[in-house]
Image (spheres, coloured by chain):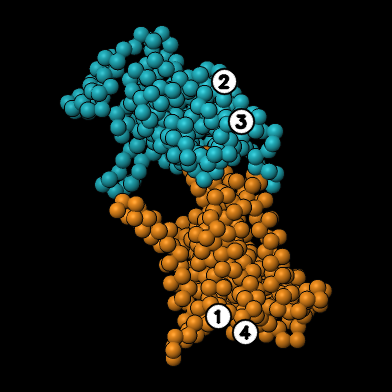
Amino acid sequence: MSGQIVIQKAFKAFNRGSVNEVKAINGIDLTINDGDFITIIGSNGAGKSTFLNALAGSFFLDSGSIIMGGEDVTTWPEHKRAAKIGRVFQDPLLGTCAGATIEQNMALAKKRGKSRGLGLGVKGRDRAYFRENLAQLGLGLEDRLRTATGLLSGGQRQALTMLMATMVRPELLLLDEHTAALDPKTAQMILELTQEMVEQQNLTALMVTHNMNQAINLGNRLVMFHRGRVVLDIAGEEKQDLKVEDLLQRFAELRGDEELSDRMLLC
Amino acid sequence: MTMYAFYGALEQGFAYGLMVLGVYLTFRILDFPDLTVDGSLPLGASVSAVAITAGYSPVVAILMASGAGFLAGMVTGILNTKLRILHLLASILTMIALYSVNLRIMGKPNVTLLGQDTIVDWFTQFSGLPQYLSTPVLFCAICAVAAVVLVWFLHTEIGLALLATGDNPQMITSQGVNTHTVIIFGVGLSNAMVACSGALVAQNQGAADVNMGVGSIVAGLASVIIGETVFGDKTIFRAILAALLGSVLYRVAIALALGLKLGAFSITPSDLNLITALLVVIALTAPTMKQKFFSKGSAA
């Protein structure tokens, strides 16, 4: 199976050996099947974002292994893993280059994981393709190819980042609370775009979210993190039948005597 | 200001033009405050002077100087990326190390090029122009070629990656680019231009001196900022042109300042560093001052 991603016995601690030691990833085993669209939930500090960063290669695991499409990428640096991974960040400013134009950003993304040479960065023949892609967004960006990305709104930049992350089909798409910093309407737009893209291209994706409804309604599989571990992993019909109350109850059980955080009550 | 002084300022402005382009590349494109310049400028001068006295052609000497500058820049880049030393400190380390290296290369504090053929002599003979004209024309032509090449380069695939590395390292890493490699190469390229400039200056003034680099980073920065303030930096092409013209403007400003006489008081070349520092402060604060002034005016 080419597209399968297998994470085995993953551990990662920060500030090791000090009193501030945090076991951010504390023994995760997870197999992501080809075409899985997994939503990830968990309280703050559960290790969701850390896990995504570990997959992207922002840091190396203390122990354990990550196999992607049959290749052991555990020791691959971030820029090398980028050939397999598309990323959208929580901060809409992180995914695009503010000083470069829209077409330059897209040209950069079109070369993700490929070697770059002395050919023109933005080729004439690419422009039609970029325009076509941008038109899908319905934001009117197709007529602003030469606008500096820094002049776009957060939502527009996030939509552009989505396009860029999937321009070269990624083996894995990582979405780290990518709608959290947007207003509700824009967030909804980005979410619909996400669903559309994942379905159209049959992508394998991981999406971290704090919104229980999103987590239940999107994707085919739901994973709950707690203290650096996977505590819940449900898919298929079982997931479809899931209700927000079930999840909240599950959270409450996990926390035991710990008080519910505001964040969870709000969802 | 006499016509000769003006031509002199043009000549200086374009001779240091490549250095200014190098400073622009690190400070503005790579977002890497690189002080290696104060060492790589005399490095270029030393290498080219020693090469010429050893019998190499002036053009080969310039190429050798550029190569040496590239290596010096790479050292700064490696100190910063692979050894994780703060960029500013990494460049200062290379800069002071280069002082000793330059002394080693020359074997003494300065090397004169008296009686040696330089690129300036060649061009004067070739063009038939008087020397006060031929030198600015030659340096202007070299700068124009370098500027065109740099504009083209920054629009290539690698150039765009360089641009993005300075702008958003996380983004470009996620696009599969190794930012370490880009920084090492970028700082190298910048210092190759700076050393090339040093070689031109040495061939023009007929000597290389180990102390000729002092304050050149501030002069370079002043030129970049003056250029941006006066000519704008909306596009890469415009910004690069502005940096070059800023270099000329800076030298003109210095020439004007040197001509100032207030009664018994006159400005001497030893006041140059003070004047340069003041120029940078003015150029840096002018945009905000202007804004403040105008917004107050409209409010009242």
Q: Residues within 10 Å of mark 3 (few under 14, many from 20)?
A: many
Q: Report x, y in % for residue B75.
A: 56, 63
Say which of B239 and A96 sits in front.
B239
Q: Which residue is mark 1?
A: B211
**Chain under numbered label 3:** A
Per the rendering, the colour in which chain A appears is: cyan
Q: CA distance from mark 1 to mark 3?
A: 52 Å
Q: In this rendering, which labeled residue sits more in front, label 3 or label 4?
A: 3
**Chain under numbered label 4:** B
Callout 1 touching callout 3 (CB < 8 Å): no
Residue reaching furthest to the bottom: B264
Q: Is residue B140 left or right of residue B169?
A: right
Q: Residue at x 33, y 26 (%)?
A: A210
Q: Which residue is mark 4?
A: B110
Q: Report x, y in % for residue A200.
A: 55, 18
Q: Residue at x 53, y 41 (%)?
A: A148
Where disc 2 sits, the SS reads helix
Where disc 4 sits, the SS reads strand
> What's the residue type where badge 3 is placed?
Phe
**Chain under numbered label 1:** B
Q: Report x, y in % for residue B17.
A: 62, 66
Disc marking residue A130: 3
Is circle 2 on the same chain as circle 3? yes
Per the rendering, the colour in which chain B appears is: orange
Residue reaching furthest to the front: B300
Q: Which residue is mark 2?
A: A201
Q: Residues within 10 Å of mark 2 (few under 14, many from 20)?
A: few
Q: Residue at x 48, y 29 (%)?
A: A159
> What's the residue type where badge 2 is placed?
Gln
**Chain under numbered label 2:** A
Q: CA distance from mark 2 to mark 4?
A: 66 Å
